[in-house]
Amino acid sequence: MSKQKAIVTTSNTLAVLIVIGIVIVANIIVGKIRGVRVDMTEEKLYSLSEGTKTVLGELGDDVSLKFFYSKSGEDTPIFLKQYAQRVQDLLHEYEVHSGNRVVIERFDPKPDSDEEDLARKYSIEGQQTQLLGGERIYLGLAATSGKNEASIPFLHPQNEAGLEYDVTRLIYEVSKTESTKVGLISGLAVMGGPQLPPQFSQGRPPEPKWFMFTDLERQMDIEDLGTSVTEIGADIGILMVVHPKNLSDDVLYAIDQFVMRGGRLMIFEDPLSIIEAQAPGQQNPMMGFLNAGSEMDKLTGPWGVTLEKGQLTADVSLASRSSGGNPLVLNLTQAQINQDDRATTGINQITVVMAGSLAVKDVEGITSTTLLSTTDQAGLLETFSAMGGQQQVMNSLKPSGKKVLGIRLMGAFPSAFPAKAEGDTKDSHLATAKDGAMVIIIADTDMLHQNFAFRLAQFGGGVMRMPGGPENGPLVANLLEQLGGSTALLDLRARDNFNRPFTKVKELEAQAAKKYQEEYKKLDDGLKEARRKIQELQGQKSADQKFIMSADQIVELKKLRDQEFDTQKKLKEVRKDLRKDVEREGMKHKVINIAGIPLLAAIFGIVYGVRRRSMSSK
Amino acid sequence: MIGHATTIAKREWAGYFNTPVAYVFIIIFLFCMGFFTFNIGNFFENGQADLSQSFFVWHPWLYLILVPAVSMGLWAEERRNNTIELLFTLPITPTQAILGKFIASWAFLGLALFLTFPVVWSASDLGDPDLGVIFSGYVGSFLLAGAYLGIGMFTSALSKDQVISFILAVVIGLLLILAGFNPVTDFLSGFLPTSVVDGIASLGFIDHYQTFQRGVMSLRDVFYFISIIGLMLFATQATLNNKAAS
């Protein structure tokens, strides 16, 4: 009997062990099956977006994606492993949706292996995870197609929301057959000034190239076309127009037709270029200020955008502290920089100086996206007011609502020169823009200059760029990159699902602020008035009562002091009331969740129990 | 076969509500969920209509204690009262009995989980939550509860003593939570090869549970939970067979 029992026990235990083995193996096998899943998120965060599908659909050559990941690394933290898993899931989607034209190769760069050398070849960077030595961990992606190659040195888990954009951008980069050339038409010596003859230069060296353009030239090919070019070459992919001052109609027409051909145009115009106005050699500062404006309304007007003529944008709430609070030097923060657009998202601070304001009008067939704006406390000032002191600027400023500082237009632009259709150029004239045309307009040129675009520090006689400060450089580079890309890339937003604020709480706060604002102001005014009267009374002693106040005055003073005390108390209460509604709302939800349903369950249980008991006793 | 299993399930289900234990459990369960979500997870103060960080994040830990409390009596009771022999002499197979009991308990846990719905209402009232993600979170939580229940059922079959069965279930559950936990994998990778550590980590609850919290329901995660449940039910049956043989 006991022998039989032993056999049964052993065979049962053995069976359980076998099943455990089967479960482990089955999970490993099923774990390798990718793509069988349902994406339940509202914005389909884990599925490929339309923009990516378009890019994959337009692939020229096949693309090979090389995924470097220290899978067997002992120091690879578990969160990175989980992230790497999600990256691989996403890459698998690329493979599937491209009809296997995107092929994924996986590498596990162990220390001192061939894979590690290969990773280095593609500038995939290993990350040191431990302070003292330890293995380098790789999690990077390289793409190759034909002769082109590009890479993302490290895929940061923090940037998961932008992962799809980065990968699609990478694929787009390598599948593109030629790099985009930037043509430049500039009224300012952004590429460096000419060497003037000695009689004019007064011994000064020629103006150096602007830092911004030195940076940009590292990433792209820039060709200075001059300000009298009448034919934009077919090799120019992006046209950058800076400070377009007195451009002739021929030049404007050339730019117009460039856009009509589906070109990408970026304009920096300015009611007042402080760089020009304060240029060395400027004889008459007054004239300098009045003549340092530029605009391209003739061209952009028919597209719905004009620069407010001779008007500067001022905004006290954005006034730069480093300029001593001058409301004409604006530090735009995230709230003024479009955080939904791929080119501007993640940019935290932009400095603009004596910028203009763009008047925007709807034009059929053109969609506009505001990239940079002010707060609704902004106002416009005449250009000459910039010469006055800061106080004068403050005094004459009347807030008149939000101003647009930067905008992007897309769509079927009409030609600004419809009359050319009848002239001698009518055969080649294009009246409407072809697909893909895009125009970005920024109402400031000074933001390109190093004095405002970066944080500079004096260093041993020269200047040095410091980290932090305005991100004008990345902004311009991003915008140019966007202009150079496929419009499909524009659809790829950073899809951030994490921010879903309690709108109701915000509303309640706003309502409370509105409701109590008036009361608060009234009380606050009353308090100020009482204090003023007290002061007045104390100073009002007439000659014959040098030191002593009259009885009436003493009574009055006491009354005022009481009033002051009362008002202060009431103000404190109003401040408390401001939070009252929100706190009440929070309490309501807490009570319902923590006590409400348990209480109902208890009541239900008691009633059910009592009924059962009475039924069974019958 | 299914017919007998559902009969057993119905009997067990009705049995729950005839004793105050079920109500006490539901009340404690809901109170803990609400308390952890609002007072420890700071759901309201965070100001985000997102349940994964303040609500679902506590489930693995609350189930760890609460589910064994439901499951510890499942077989221990029958064995103590010697009703188990009686059960197995009925015209039903042990598999049917096991399935029936499991389904009833799982449904009961599902009911308790369903009664947390006010938190969804709160999120929708205060903001604009992603309901798809919440749904997927609930599915993940329900599967997780099933896995804990499977473990609890198995340990209940192992011992006549409910306390021992409870403690065993908590220990096994804890091991499965910790398998994917950073400090543990770091410790293990000190002396085990990476592939083994990865294998152990992929057997843990957390990784699979979190996928649901992100709003993705994938085959491998559903399969994982179902396979754990299947394994535990099989082990339960083997254990009961062993005991029956003795």
Image (cartoon, helix red, strand yellow):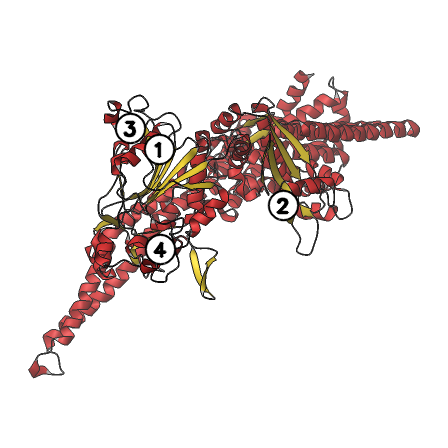
Whole-percent x, y for residue A354 in the image: 29, 52
Three-letter amino acid code at the position of disc 4:
Leu
Residue A471 placement, left or right of A26:
left
Task: Determine which quarter of the picture holds residue A1.
Answer: top right
Question: Of circles 4 and 2, which is in front?
Answer: 4
Would you place residue A367 above or below residue A503 in this image?
Answer: above
- Mark 1–mark 3 Cα distance, whole angstroms, equals 16 Å
Three-letter amino acid code at the position of disc 3:
Ser
Question: Of circles 1 and 2, which is in front?
Answer: 1
Marks 1 and 2 on same chain:
yes
Give the chain of mark 4.
A
- Secondary structure at badge 2 equals loop
Q: Earlier in the sequence, mark 4 or mark 2?
A: 2
The residue lying toward the viewer, choosing from A361 and B14, is A361
Would you place residue A36 above or below residue B52 in this image?
Answer: above
Would you place residue A277 above or below residue A52 in this image?
Answer: below
Three-letter amino acid code at the position of disc 2:
Glu
Q: Earlier in the sequence, mark 1 or mark 3?
A: 1
Q: Which residue is denoted by mark 3 in the rendering?
A: A415
Q: Which residue is denoted by mark 1 in the rendering?
A: A231
Task: Determine which quarter of the picture holds residue A84.
Answer: top right
Q: Which residue is denoted by mark 4 in the rendering?
A: A196
- Secondary structure at badge 1 equals loop
- Mark 4–mark 2 Cα distance, whole angstroms, equals 47 Å
Give the chain of mark 1.
A
The residue lying toward the viewer, choosing from A330 and A411, is A411
Q: Which residue is denoted by mark 2 in the rendering?
A: A125
**CB of mark 4 within 8 Å of CB of mark 2?**
no
- Mark 4–mark 1 Cα distance, whole angstroms, equals 28 Å
Q: Which residue shows up at 22% across the image and 66% down it?
A: A564
- Secondary structure at badge 3 equals loop
